[in-house]
Image (cartoon, rainbow, N blue to C red):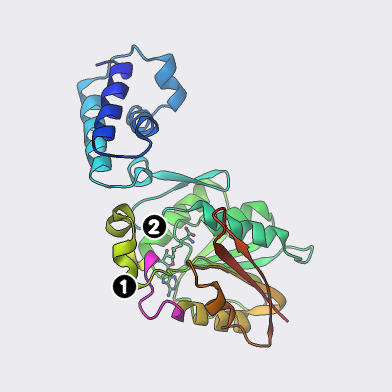
Amino acid sequence: MTIREALRSATERLDRHYVSNSRLTAELLLAHTLTVEREYLYTHDERTLTGEESQKLEDRLYDRISGVPLQYIVGRQEFYGRYFRVNPSVLIPRPETEYIIEAVLDSKHPARPLTILDVGTGSGCLAVTLALELAHSKVFAADISFEALLVAKDNAATLKAPVEFVCMDAIDAIAAQLDFIVSNPPYVRRDEITQLQREVREHEPHVALFSPEDELAIYRKLVRAGEAMLQPGGYLIMEVGIRMDEQILRLFGAEWETLPTKNDLQGIPRTVVARLR
Ligand SMILES: C[S@@+](CC[C@H](N)C(=O)[O-])C[C@H]1O[C@@H](n2cnc3c(N)ncnc32)[C@H](O)[C@@H]1O
């Protein structure tokens, strides 16, 4: 079978199983199988696949049709213009989380190397991006999942980002006098599990999706951690779930100044920003 035939047949199969973006998915799966860029598929469309390549493509199509997210199959996801390795130990970085990066970059931070903590780093997308965008800053990244930290460390090494990783719960103090705490914590309520897409529910790590207590508990811990670890004028920037913004803003006491919550592209209030007075 040639590359052109493989692409046509893979696209048809994905369509029959209602997989979205079937043509693009077929191209990405085949490019990953052949370890080439997508453009290669068009410049070499008469090339014949070996038996081993056809079998690998078949296995990957089966996984995708069974609901495995494309990013876990190809093993990467783009975030703020860089590719991050992902596997089922980490949440797949989402575009709305990039607003946290923008909130940090747009803030009135001092013009000196900054000290930043990312709580619940997952793939390391926030910590690594901040370390690279704000050169000379001291970036710490924490996660309760040891497996996630392995992926984050690997991403930091590949992207040459100086980040210090710690395995810890959100509440542990790690350093004082921080300029920023950023976090995209687990915020889905347990009783919302059936509303999640099957791909998310069955394949993304539950420790990244669900809070073990009520969904506000981790935010309370983050506000307390901010009061203990931020220096005056330091920022706490957190992603929040749909319709959670007002409840979360109420967690901040008089020692905080809350700034306007940033909406995502769908107009959903998504990024809460607060500054310690
Ligand atoms: C929603 S994911 C975010 C991952 C990454 N920051 C991102 O935005 O793609 C939440 C992360 O928080 C971690 N986590 C869950 N509970 C935690 C806790 N109590 N303390 C620290 N990390 C926690 C999970 O392991 C997971 O990696």
The label on residue 191 is 1
> Is 58 displayed left or right of 188 in the figure?
left
Q: Residue furthest top?
A: 46
Up/down of 15 relative to 99, above or below: above
Residue 172 appearing in the image: no
Up/down of 157 relative to 17, above or below: below
Query: Callout 1 environment at 10 Å: few (<14), some (14 to 19), or many (20+)?
Result: few
Residue 185 painted magenta: no
- Residue 91 quadrant: bottom left
Which residue is labeled 2 in the image? 90
> Is 256 displayed left or right of 125 in the figure?
right
Up/down of 145 relative to 151, above or below: below
Q: Give the range drawn in magenta.
A: 208-217
Q: In which quarter of the image is the N terminus?
A: top left
The label on residue 86 is none
Report the mark closest to the observer, 2 or 1: 1
Q: Earlier in the sequence, mark 2 or mark 1?
A: 2
Q: In which quarter of the image is ligand 1?
A: bottom left
Residue 49 in percent (x, y) is at 27, 19
- Residue 8 quadrant: top left
Q: Residue at left 44%, top 76%?
A: 169
